[in-house]
Image (spheres, rainbow, N blue to C red):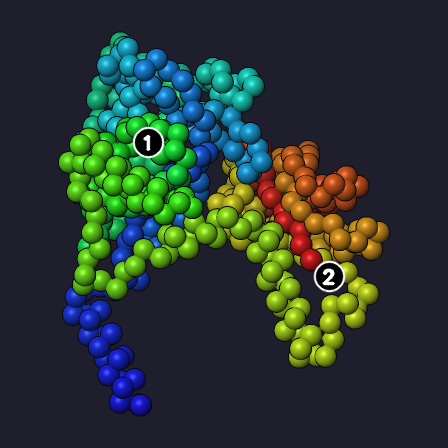
């Protein structure tokens, strides 16, 4: 038995090193295309923050305009950017081409949130470049001097945001064997509603940024429909770009399980996961101590504060990491507030999203509850007031606006 185990381990190690990679080392780039957002995944598990969009109708084309959202329930505000309008009469539909949208010296889009209801009005502070200015696009060596008519302001395409992310990741992981391969996980509604052609700008851009193989997976409960849709999608992609369908490399242990698992996990809300996790812990502790959760009269509510700086919105002179560290240090105080209110009204949970502003001195000058699903206004206000009492480190100048979600569970 021992010899068999040692042989299996030796075989696995030899295959991994002999072929230069195993599935854990693969880049596994993928784009998940859903009804209201797109998201890039890499290394099988690592997702980039979702890019939310709103479909705008233009003559002869739809534009998947990027939306800035402070939290999931936020309706969002349209983003506007500076584009190279070629051809001029179609600049509003020319999307996802690396040579179409201008960037600054850091590679970030020249973009701002719109004004008015949902940001539908172009922002006044987003100015066209002056004649003679030099600007670059996402394409390599694309610096050009701007002359009259060489720039226009249009809604920022969500496809452009995805293309920017893919370009960055291919540059970072250029040594990976599968850096020229990508998988598309597309919601079945795009095929049932005959909307697959609306993704053409994104698909065409895949070839422009260097991909050679594309694999399509359709997310739908009807397996036969999925198979027919994938066949049609591969034919259309080949017709548009000449990109061949991606085939699994037989040398690799890689299986396209991780992205599928990620899609399944995405269907579970964070609160559902936390509830299950907490219940499992309670069950294990009960088995060890001989007590159950019902044996205690003390509330056991928890307040989940995001771990990653990317999970909160920070605009201003402070870093999201520093702001989050201060909030997390006050986490026990927020838990105490939750448990005190559970004594008054047991069983409530949900999400509370707070919006506040930090003055340069470090004091919180204004707070507001941007969203709540607790149905308990008195508790929401108590959490808001507690955050309003927090003190952050002083900075030289400039206020900072923060949006942070808190998840409550028992």
Q: State the image quarter where residue 351 is shown.
A: top right
SS class of the residue under badge 1? helix
123 lies left or right of 366: left
Sort mark 1 into few (<14), some (14-19) or many (20+) by Cα contacts within 10 Å: some
Image: 305 above or below 38: below
Image: 43 above or below 316: below
Pinpoint residue 33: horizontal percent, then vertical percent. Answer: 38, 38
Pinpoint residue 148: horizontal percent, then vertical percent. Answer: 26, 9
Which residue occupies 77% across, 42% down? 376
Which sits in the foreground, 323 or 273?
273
212 lies left or right of 2: left
Can residue 299 be spotted in the picture?
A: yes
Which residue occupies 49% across, 21% down? 114
343 lies left or right of 275: right
Q: Quadrant of the N terminus?
A: bottom left
Q: Which label lies toward us, 1 or 2?
A: 1
Which sits in the foreground, 362 or 29?
29
Outermost residue on the front side: it is 224
Can residue 207 be spotted in the picture?
A: no
Which sits in the foreground, 53 or 131?
53
Pinpoint residue 101: horizontal percent, then vertical percent. Answer: 30, 25
Q: Quadrant of the C terminus?
A: bottom right
Image: 316 above or below 261: above
Q: Which residue is mark 1?
A: 196
Count of numbered circles in the view: 2
SS class of the residue under badge 2? loop
Q: Which residue is mark 2?
A: 300
Which residue occupies 33% across, 50% down? 42
């Amino acid at each position: 038995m021992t010899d068999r185990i040692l042989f299996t381990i030796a075989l696995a190690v030899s295959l991994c090193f002999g072929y230069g990679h195993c599935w854990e080392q693969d880049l596994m780039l993928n784009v998940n295309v859903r009804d209201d957002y797109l998201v890039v995944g890499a290394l099988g598990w690592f997702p980039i923050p979702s890019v939310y969009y709103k479909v705008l109708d233009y003559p002869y084309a739809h534009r998947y305009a990027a939306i800035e959202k402070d939290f999931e329930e936020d309706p969002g505000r349209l983003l506007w950017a500076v584009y190279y309008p070629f051809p001029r009469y179609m600049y509003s539909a020319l999307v996802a081409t690396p040579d179409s949208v201008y960037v600054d010296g850091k590679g970030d889009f020249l973009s701002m949130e719109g004004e008015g209801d949902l940001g539908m009005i172009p922002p006044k502070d987003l100015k066209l470049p002056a004649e003679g200015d030099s600007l670059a696009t996402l394409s390599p060596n694309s610096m050009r001097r701007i002359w009259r008519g060489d720039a226009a302001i249009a809604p920022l395409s969500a496809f452009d945001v995805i293309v920017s992310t893919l370009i960055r990741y291919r540059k970072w992981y250029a040594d990976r064997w599968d850096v020229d391969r990508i998988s598309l996980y597309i919601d079945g509604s795009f095929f049932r509603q005959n909307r697959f052609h609306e993704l053409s700008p994104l698909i065409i851009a895949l070839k422009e940024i260097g991909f050679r193989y594309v694999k399509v997976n359709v997310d739908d409960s009807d397996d036969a429909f999925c198979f027919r849709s994938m066949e049609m999608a591969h034919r259309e992609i080949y017709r548009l770009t000449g990109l061949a369908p991606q085939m699994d490399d037989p040398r690799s242990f890689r299986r396209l399980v991780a992205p599928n698992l990620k899609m399944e996990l995405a269907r579970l809300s964070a609160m559902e996961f936390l509830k299950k996790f907490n219940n499992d812990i309670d069950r294990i502790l009960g088995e060890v101590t001989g007590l159950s959760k019902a044996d205690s009269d003390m509330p056991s509510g928890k307040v989940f504060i995001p771990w990653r700086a990317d999970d909160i919105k920070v605009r201003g002179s402070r870093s999201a990491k520093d702001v989050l560290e201060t909030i997390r240090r006050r986490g026990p105080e927020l838990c105490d507030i939750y448990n005190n209110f559970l004594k008054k009204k047991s069983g409530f949970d949900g999400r509370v999203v707070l919006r506040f502003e930090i003055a340069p001195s470090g004091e919180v000058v204004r707070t507001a509850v941007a969203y709540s699903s607790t149905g308990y206004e008195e508790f929401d206000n108590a959490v808001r007031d507690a955050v309003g009492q927090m003190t952050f480190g002083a900075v030289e100048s400039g206020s900072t606006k923060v949006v942070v979600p808190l998840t409550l569970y028992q």
